[in-house]
Amino acid sequence: MTPRRRILPIFVPHAGCPNQCVFCDQRRISGSLFPASGAQVRRALEELGPGPEVELAFYGGSFTAVDPALQEELLQAAEPYRRRGRVTAIRISTRPDAVDGPALARLGRWGVETVELGAQSMDDGVLARCGRGHTAGDTVRAAALVREAGFSLILQMMTGLPGSGKEQDLETARRLADLQPEGMRIYPTVVLRGTELEAMWRRGEYREHTVEDAVRVCARILPLLEERGIPVIRLGLNPTEELSAGGAVAGAYHPALGELVRSRILLDRARRLLAEAGATGEAVLGVCPARVSAMTGWKRCNLRCLEEEFSLARVRVTACPGLKKEDIRLL
Ligand code: SF4
């Protein structure tokens, strides 16, 4: 088996950010208080030891808006490792209004391959309420520049932001899909301790986006993106001790959110299948082996739900090796 490429995240929390988005606390999410330096990049690479190829990822800030001298320092630190083939790819994340020709040319000179844009929403009212400081038009323009310059484009969106609802979230997903990214990350909104969003939530100005809200809307968004050939490479914040220990005060924080969403998508598909077939008595659902647990759900919750909804004596799941991940068959 070929060893997988390892991603080495280097955090530059809030570096380059011209303002403070209401939901964001990169120091809490990343666990890093200060932006990394070139020396830290070198140390992180040396400490990795032998192993598979490494992809360096600068996350947590607005990379292309960081002082160009620091951008050069960070990327230059990776250069000897890139020349030796230890680092085989570099990616950065940034905000849409911080992308222009000179910024992309700098990234290209240092071998950056992938640019991730934090679009978050394609609704200008939502962006304004979140204090993003850019518009949906900026995202359209930046995405075009990134693609024209030959980088891989990854778009990040959030669900459940202030002023947004299911329809706006779906529309954001559709409009971002139109920009033809190579992949997307979806971050349902989490209320982080100490953020302006927490204050808005405590004042009753923001209704939290619950785990259930997030599962429902993401179970619509994922198929919409995947039907258009756009993989979702991350769903939900990475679980950390800090977030689990109270850093996430409300909202859609769940260590296995992606699994919950996959499980709901299968439940919805099974519902349609059973309704079309007019199933009675006992039903057996065939899924690919990797999806048996998602179809079954936590403590059989999906199967119990189907048994109740369709008055079935029993619903069972069985592994069918020939099936694709998204397929279900009534056996
Ligand atoms: S969401 Fe992005 S642009 Fe906004 S404060 Fe956080 S890192 Fe900066």
Image (spheres, rainbow, N blue to C red):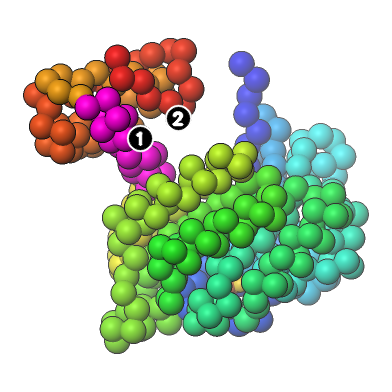
Q: Is ligand 1 less than 8 Å from the beta carbon at label 2?
A: no
The spot of residue 103 in percent (x, y) is 84, 66
Asked if residue 320 is positioned above or below residue 185 in the image, the reply reads above
| Residue named by callout 2 | 326
Is residue 237 shown in magenta?
no
Write the start and end of the magenta stretch as one range.
257-278
Q: Is residue 174 above or below residue 61?
A: above
Q: Is residue 18 left or right of residue 313?
A: right
Quadrant for the N terminus, please.
Answer: top right
Give the CA distance from mark 2 to mark 1. Answer: 9 Å
Residue at horizontal 62 percent and vertical 52 percent from the top: 177
Q: Which residue is mark 1?
A: 269
Let me know if residue 274 is in the magenta part: yes
- Where on the picture, by quarter, is residue 3? top right
**Image marks 2 and 1: residues in contact by CB distance under 8 Å:** yes
- Left or right: 114 as drawn, with respect to 273: right
Categorize mark 2 by other alpha carbons within 10 Å: few (<14), some (14-19), many (20+): few
Q: Nearer the viewer, mark 2 or mark 1?
A: 1
